[in-house]
Image (cartoon, rainbow, N blue to C red):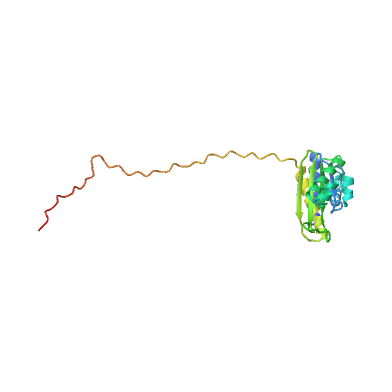
């Protein structure tokens, strides 16, 4: 994934947020502020980007974002529950419309049973209560690649959330299936004038003795 892709995604997101008058905050762990850096790389981004939280340790997640200690102890720092709590915490601690969170294992170490290197949880929360979560398993592709791909996913998720809730798709009622009536084969009628002759049994012959 090239830097030009990240730059294009960032620019597109910023333009969308300006159009819809939305502001953003980031809460990052394994990416260490790369999402905020990608957005603020674009000139004029200050009208959209409000702030970024770099919460690398569990203590920082609790102190800066209000993630419950019980959540961290029960599910771990790299989990859906923690990512969701980080996103909502960023919303509560910043006067913004959207917040994205990232927590994962970029490697090369840090893997635990069930949580391999390359596992990343992302969440995006909106002021109107919407929340989206995504689990990515990038694999052991290298620390830089895991972080870069995480940034791309975060920008895509923010863009999707910035577009707003999608109206439900109304299903059109199915038309009743037209089933042709089965054709009943009819035997042709015989004309009234022609009657079928019935064969009469011949009279019994006397037996020859």
Q: Position of residue 58 (x, y in %)?
A: 87, 50
Most extreme residue toward the left is: 209
Q: Nearer the viewer, residue 46 or 117?
A: 117
Q: Position of residue 13 (x, y in %)?
A: 79, 46
Q: Position of residue 68 (x, y in %)?
A: 85, 45
**Image quarter of residue 197:** top left
| Residue 139 seen in the current view | yes
Q: Nearer the viewer, residue 112 or 12?
A: 112
In the rendered image of this protein, does residue 182 appear above or below residue 32? above
Most extreme residue toward the front is: 209
| Residue 51 seen in the current view | no
Q: How many marks?
A: 0
Q: Nearer the viewer, residue 29 or 34?
A: 29
Q: Quadrant of the N terminus?
A: bottom right
Position of residue 14 in the picture relative to residue 165 (left or right): right
**Image quarter of residue 160:** top right
Question: Residue visible at 83% across and 49% down?
Answer: 72
In the rendered image of this protein, does residue 66 appear above or below residue 145? above
Q: Position of residue 53 (x, y in %)?
A: 88, 47
Q: Quadrant of the C terminus?
A: bottom left
Position of residue 75 in the picture relative to residue 175 (left or right): right
């Amino acid at each position: 994934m090239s830097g030009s892709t990240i730059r294009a995604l960032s620019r597109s997101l910023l333009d969308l947020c300006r159009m819809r008058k939305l502001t953003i905050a980031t809460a990052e762990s394994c990416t260490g502020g790369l999402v905020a850096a990608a957005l603020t790389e674009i000139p004029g981004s200050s009208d959209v980007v409000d702030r970024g939280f770099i919460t690398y340790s569990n203590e920082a997640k609790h102190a800066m974002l209000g993630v419950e200690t019980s959540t961290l102890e029960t599910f771990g720092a790299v989990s859906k529950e923690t990512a969701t709590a980080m996103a909502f915490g960023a919303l509560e601690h910043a006067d913004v419309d959207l917040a994205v969170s990232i927590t994962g294992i970029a490697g090369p170490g840090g893997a635990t049973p069930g949580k391999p290197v390359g596992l990343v949880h992302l969440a995006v929360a909106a002021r109107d209560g919407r929340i989206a979560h995504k689990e990515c398993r990038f694999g052991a592709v290298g620390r830089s690649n895991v972080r870069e791909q995480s940034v791309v996913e975060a920008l895509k998720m923010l863009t999707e959330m910035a577009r707003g809730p999608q109206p439900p798709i109304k299903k059109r009622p199915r038309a009743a299936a037209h089933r042709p009536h089965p054709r009943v084969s009819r035997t042709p009628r015989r004309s009234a004038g022609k009657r079928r002759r019935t064969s009469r049994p011949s009279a019994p012959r006397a037996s020859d003795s």
